[in-house]
Structures are given as C-alpha cells and as structure tokens.
Image (spheres, grey):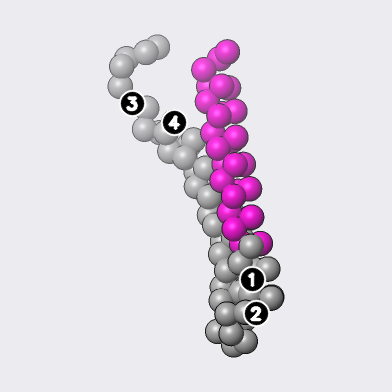
C-alpha cells in the first residue's frame, strides 16, 4: 500500500548495514594511515614503510567505497522488485 509518505522504520533498517560497511572500511582504511604517519614522523618523510602504508590505506578506502556503492545498487534493485 503506497500512501506517499516515508517509512522511516524501513529507512533505518536499510541504513544500518550501510553504516556498518562505512564504519568497517573507514576504520580499516584509517589504521594504515595512522601507522604510516607514525613512521613518517619517526623516520622522516622519505620513509618507505610510511609511503607503503599510506598507499595501502588509500587502497582500502577506495575498495571499501566501491563495495559500499555496489551494496547500495544491489539493494536498490532488490527493493524495486525488478
């Protein structure tokens, strides 16, 4: 039954898994940044380990963003009954 109003309970039920994915990949991506920054401060900006960890953090955030977007698209297709 379509009443033309928002079903806020359904919106919250759909938002929780997305929030979980965003937090998961955010924390996983920020950990290498933090450790890499520690190496950079300790050993200078030319630290190879700091550079690799920064690259790894960016990779995790990029892959996590893609996974979150794919989840949103797949879930939208499931909800549209196509």
Q: 10 Å neighbourhood of mark 1: few (<14), some, or many (≥20)?
A: some
Label 4–label 2 contact, CB within 8 A: no
Q: Position of residue 58 (x, y in %)?
A: 59, 58
Mark-to-mark CA distance, 4 and 2: 48 Å
Mark-to-mark CA distance, 3 and 4: 9 Å
Q: 10 Å neighbourhood of mark 2: few (<14), some, or many (≥20)?
A: some
Q: Residue at x 59, y 50 (%)?
A: 62
Label 1–label 4 contact, CB within 8 A: no
* Residue span colored magenta: 56-82
Q: In the orientation shown, which residue stands out farthest toward the bottom?
A: 42
Q: Residue at x 58, y 85 (%)?
A: 44
74 in the magenta segment: yes
Mark-to-mark CA distance, 1 and 3: 47 Å
Residue ID for mark 1: 51
Residue ID for mark 3: 6
- The overriding secondary structure of the stretch rendered in magenta is helix
Q: Nearer the viewer, mark 1 or mark 4?
A: 1
Which circle marks residue 10 in the picture?
A: 4
């Amino acid at each position: 039954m379509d009443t033309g109003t928002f079903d806020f309970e359904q919106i919250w039920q759909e938002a929780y898994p997305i929030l979980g994915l965003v937090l998961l990949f955010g924390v996983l991506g920020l950990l290498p940044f933090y450790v890499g920054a520690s190496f950079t401060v300790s050993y200078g900006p030319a630290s190879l380990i700091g550079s690799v960890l920064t690259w790894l953090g960016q990779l995790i955030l990029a892959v996590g963003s893609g996974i979150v977007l794919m989840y949103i698209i797949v879930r939208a297709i499931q909800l549209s009954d196509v």
